[in-house]
Image (cartoon, rainbow, N blue to C red):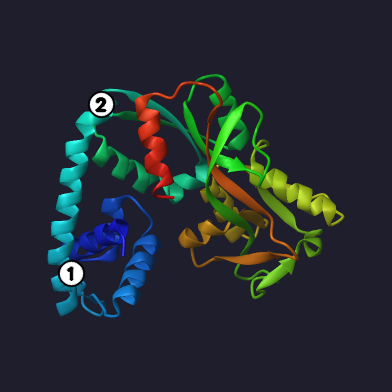
Amino acid sequence: MDLRQLRYFRAVATLGGFRRAAEALSIAQPAVSQQIRRLEAELGTPLFERDRRPVALTAAGEQLLLHAERVLADVAAVEADMRRFSGAEGERLALGVMQYLTLLDLPELLVRFHAAHAGIEVTVSVGNTGELEALLRQGQIELAVAHVREGDEPAGLTAEPLRHEELVLLVDVRHRLAGRERVDIADLAREAFVVSRVGGLIRETFAVAAREAGFEPHVAFETVDMTTTVGLVASRLGVAVAPRAMTAVLGADVVAVALGPTAPTLVVTLLRVAGRRRTPAARLFSAFVKGRF
């Protein structure tokens, strides 16, 4: 059990539904449902009566809500008490993030960071890894959440790993590969691909794997965001490669298939310019994001 699960649980309990809770938390509904299922599995008992509208708490859920309210109130009090020691209130933090994270981790991270450090103004630039690295070097952003290849830290930048991500193939549900558990990259030579702009490390990493398998990926469309990419895949206009984490927000028209024989992987990292002094706001965000990714 962790604080995120308790916050999700409280939101569903007080708002009366998973959709309303997701909207209030500014995250995808599947992420809320997944965390509640994990919490119920850990506790060994159902917390909600899901066949009722709005959803209702079980007896165990009513008892947990009492505990959750006390725990979360105590945490909020501790965070508020500690903010005055940070020396960062009133500062600004210029942050860069990869676009697909705006569909997954970013909204919740910013909501929770703002709750803990309301005096820090955060501005966000969105782009692919190449674009974010350029913004870092130009001094336009102080931190970036971006991909690197394992063991390949960009020159002049410091990379702190947050999580490893397996790349998967996205296809529409009617595609010939939709029922497969795994597909060899070599079998994709005739596929049309929907890819990100040049500079995206997902695109570059898969291109290297494809060349090793004996072909150059045929690019049918370039997009600027993952929502458009998934939409084009759902419309049967091509296939795409994406982090497995994206499966949490896929609709019913698109499925993920594992890539083989060895799946390409990337590391989500927190990037900053090596040797450049970090502001108190950047130090606080660095510690915050590493504790929650």
Asked if residue 187 is positioned above or below residue 146 in the image, the reply reads: below
Please indicate whether residue 119 sits to the left or right of residue 141 in the image. left
The answer to whether residue 20 shows anywhere in this view is no
The mark found on residue 149 in the picture is none
> Mark 2: which amino acid?
Glu
Q: Position of residue 268 (x, y in %)?
A: 55, 46
> Mark 1: which amino acid?
Leu
Number of residues whose C-alpha sits closer than 10 Å to that of mark 2, classed few (under 14), some (14–19) or many (20 or more): some
Please indicate whether residue 40 sits to the left or right of residue 154 in the image. left
Residue 94 in which image quadrant: top left
Q: Position of residue 266 (x, y in %)?
A: 62, 49
Q: Position of residue 233 (x, y in %)?
A: 61, 57
Identify residue for label 2.
Answer: 89
For numbered disc 1, what is the local secondary structure? Answer: helix
Number of residues whose C-alpha sits closer than 10 Å to that of mark 1, classed few (under 14), some (14–19) or many (20 or more): some
Q: Residue at x 58, y 60 (%)?
A: 234
Identify residue for label 1.
Answer: 64
Q: Residue at x 58, y 22 (%)?
A: 137
Residue 165 in which image quadrant: bottom right
